[in-house]
Image (cartoon, rainbow, N blue to C red):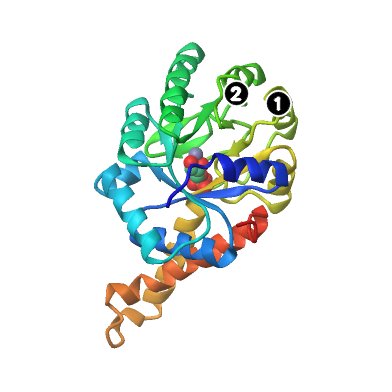
Amino acid sequence: ALVSATEMLNKAHEGHYAVGAFNINNMEWTKAILLAAEEAKSPVMLGVSEGAAKYMCGFKTVVAMVKEIHDNLGITVPVALHLDHGSYDGAKACIEAGFTSVMFDGSHYAFEENLEKSKEMIELAHSKGLSIECEVGGIGGEEDGVTSMGELADPQECKTIAELGVDFLAAGIGNIHGKYPANWAGLNFERLGEIQNVTNGKPLVLHGGSGIPADQIAKAISLGVSKINVNTELQLVFAAATREYIEAGKDTEGKGYDPRKLLKPGADAIKAKVIAMMEEFGSAGKA
Ligand code: G3H
Ligand code: ZN
């Protein structure tokens, strides 16, 4: 069965590694990531943005699809189905639909309102046995058409939200969604360290996990990051592998146009990338 993410992330925090939260878009993504986790013997979180859920015909469809694929493949490692960057209404809907973890992202509200809504959502999620992530300080870049500025989170605000009993906390430390620009300043470790100090060892979440150099990932984990969100990286490897297949003319050979063949190089590329990231994050072999 799918599980809440609390235990896997607390273990990751104690063990100084991070669990990947990989965003899914469809059956191919789901299958590739679950197979990767099983092969790497790693716990895993499947992230679902509200936009992706809409694309997959709603939260209930996502829950049904993920559960069936999980059982059909005989997955034995811990898997959490997590709403990524949830709105107030979206998080409530996911709690009802059967997700096992939700993020309530109130970072675009004024802090008092974020605090009030986060408190309500933490109580609701916990009353139903789900784990919950909240966010302080916007993450840079663009996601589902919403652009935020990528400020550094205020440690005092992080402390206040942590004390509400949130299970893990996303805080802006100079990370950006999507590709990192050439002039990116890198993660702000001083701020990350301060946030970990005032939040009393709460597992922290690093968004925008695509394209961060390995040494910065390792340092972030050493400073309390226990969950790393990855979306763009998997889209890039899928697109590149699919392009290669088509440019080589393989879709025109035999039945190469069959979607089960056409989408296979991309799905294999996702699986390989996820395994490599599980090794990099240190979660491989931990399930
Ligand atoms: O919430 C999802 C992530 O933060 C993904 O960021 O697309 O840069 O990997 P990314
Ligand atoms: Zn994110």
Q: Is residue 77 above or below residue 59?
A: below
- Tell me the element at label 1: loop
The residue located at (53%, 61%) in the rendering is: 37
Q: Write down the residue under mark 2.
A: 162
Q: Write down the residue under mark 1.
A: 200
Residue 20 on image: x %, y %: 56, 50
Left-right relation of 161 to 246: right
Badge 2 density bin: few <14, some 14–19, many ≥20, Cα 10 Å: many
Which numbered marker is on residue 161? Answer: none
Report the amino acid beneath label 2: Ala
Q: Is residue 266 above or below residue 202?
A: below
The reply to whether residue 178 is visible in this rendering is no
Left-right relation of 230 to 246: right
Residue 33 on image: x %, y %: 47, 60
- Tell me the element at label 2: helix
Badge 1 density bin: few <14, some 14–19, many ≥20, Cα 10 Å: few
Residue 45 on image: x %, y %: 50, 49
The residue located at (75%, 42%) in the rendering is: 222
Residue 129 on image: x %, y %: 45, 35
Report the amino acid beneath label 1: Asn
The residue located at (57%, 46%) in the rendering is: 209
Q: Quadrant of the C terminus?
A: bottom right
Q: Earlier in the sequence, mark 2 or mark 1?
A: 2
The reply to whether residue 113 is visible in this rendering is yes
Q: Is residue 169 above or below residue 44?
A: above
Instruction: Work out which residue is located at the far top of the displayed protein and give it.
Output: 112
Mark 2 vs 1: CB contact within 8 A: yes
